[in-house]
Image (cartoon, rainbow, N blue to C red):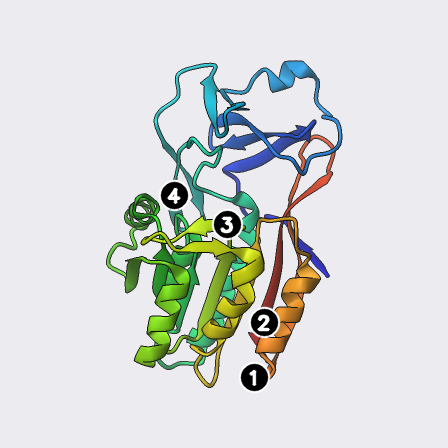
């Protein structure tokens, strides 16, 4: 089991965590956000938490809102290697970037570069539930063709803006506002094949045409279908989820089951952030991944 943390993300810090909240720096701004996984007490005193530029508060009626302690720009940017992406506080507490995914971006980039060094055409990568596209851009910058699939038009627009900010607007990336399951079925019928697949599975979601996604009912079937899209010599399959209801072992079992016909091996574990205040790791995401030998 692996625990992966960001190693190359100077524009982000988890300053502290405690009492179901995180204190984080995105670029030059400090945000205070809720996180139910944080069961311990803060290491920093209240005066440090009071320095937050914005605080997200839950609403008793559902959702929540940001309380701004000083005027912030509507959005700003942060960098990862050659990429530049937009950060913007949203009504759902998220800001468009999951910094714990830095280890995933690095791994994807390395896998694509490995295939490119062997020669041949650019690897073809499918990214499902692709959100604001940092993983898509990491693959593209390393030399891959990418199909970026998300059911939200606003989120895909955000991802395309990130591509423009990163100078990748002319790269072969297809931006698809689609339900992941519906799109996968159609690609199977078309006979399209991919060298690598990324699935960032949400707990619950709705597709572009009202399709309902429930991870406990739909993930195994989606994984089985996407594995049918792989080329005879695939590069990788990456499966991860923010939900805490399933272990990385469960994801690994599914992945091994569906990848038995290919030569390779799986790894599994957690994506975590490290508190600057005391070195505590904060687990946020479980993952399993298969790679070719």
Query: Which residue position holds label 4?
Result: 85
SS at mark 3 in the image = strand
Q: Earlier in the sequence, mark 4 or mark 3?
A: 4
- Distance from the alpha carbon under mark 1 to that under mark 4: 35 Å
Check contact, mark 1 vs mark 2: CB within 8 A: yes
Comparing marks 4 and 2, which lies closer to the viewer?
2
Q: Earlier in the sequence, mark 1 or mark 4?
A: 4
* Depth order, front residue of 1/276: 1
- Distance from the alpha carbon under mark 4 to that under mark 2: 27 Å
For label 4, count other residues whose C-alpha is less than 10 Å away and answer few (under 14), some (14-19) or many (20+).
Answer: many
Q: x, y (%) of residue 225?
A: 47, 73
Query: Which residue position holds label 3?
Result: 204
For label 1, count other residues whose C-alpha is less than 10 Å away and answer few (under 14), some (14-19) or many (20+).
Answer: some
Up-down relation of residue 148 to residue 66 (above or below) = below
Check contact, mark 3 vs mark 1: CB within 8 A: no
Up-down relation of residue 68 to residue 74 (above or below) = above
- What number is the disc on residue 262? 1
């Amino acid at each position: 089991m692996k625990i992966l943390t960001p190693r190359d993300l100077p524009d982000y810090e988890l300053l502290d965590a405690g009492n179901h909240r995180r204190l984080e720096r995105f670029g030059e701004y400090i945000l205070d956000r809720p996180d139910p996984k944080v069961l311990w007490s803060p290491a920093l005193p209240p005066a440090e938490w009071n320095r937050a530029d914005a605080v997200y508060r839950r609403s008793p009626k559902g959702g929540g809102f940001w309380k701004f302690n000083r005027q912030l720009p509507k959005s700003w940017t942060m960098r990862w290697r050659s990429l530049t992406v937009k950060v913007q506080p949203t009504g759902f507490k998220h800001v468009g970037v999951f910094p714990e995914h830095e280890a995933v971006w690095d791994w994807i980039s390395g896998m694509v570069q490995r295939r490119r060094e062997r020669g041949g055409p650019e690897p073809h990568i499918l990214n499902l539930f692709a959100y604001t596209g940092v993983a898509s851009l990491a693959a593209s910058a390393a030399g891959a063709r990418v199909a970026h699939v998300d059911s939200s038009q606003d989120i895909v627009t955000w991802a395309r803006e990130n591509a423009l900010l990163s100078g990748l607007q002319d790269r072969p990336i297809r931006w698809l506002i689609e339900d992941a399951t519906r799109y996968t079925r159609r690609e199977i019928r078309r006979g399209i094949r991919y060298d690598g697949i990324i699935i960032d599975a949400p707990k619950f979601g709705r597709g572009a045409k009202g399709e309902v996604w429930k991870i406990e009912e739909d993930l195994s079937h989606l994984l089985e279908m996407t594995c049918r899209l792989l080329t005879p010599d695939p590069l990788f399959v990456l499966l991860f989820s923010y939900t805490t209801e399933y272990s990385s072992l469960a994801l690994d079992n599914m992945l091994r089951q569906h990848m038995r016909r290919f030569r390779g091996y799986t790894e599994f574990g957690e994506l975590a952030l490290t508190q600057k205040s005391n070195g505590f790791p904060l687990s946020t995401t479980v993952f399993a991944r298969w790679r070719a030998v």
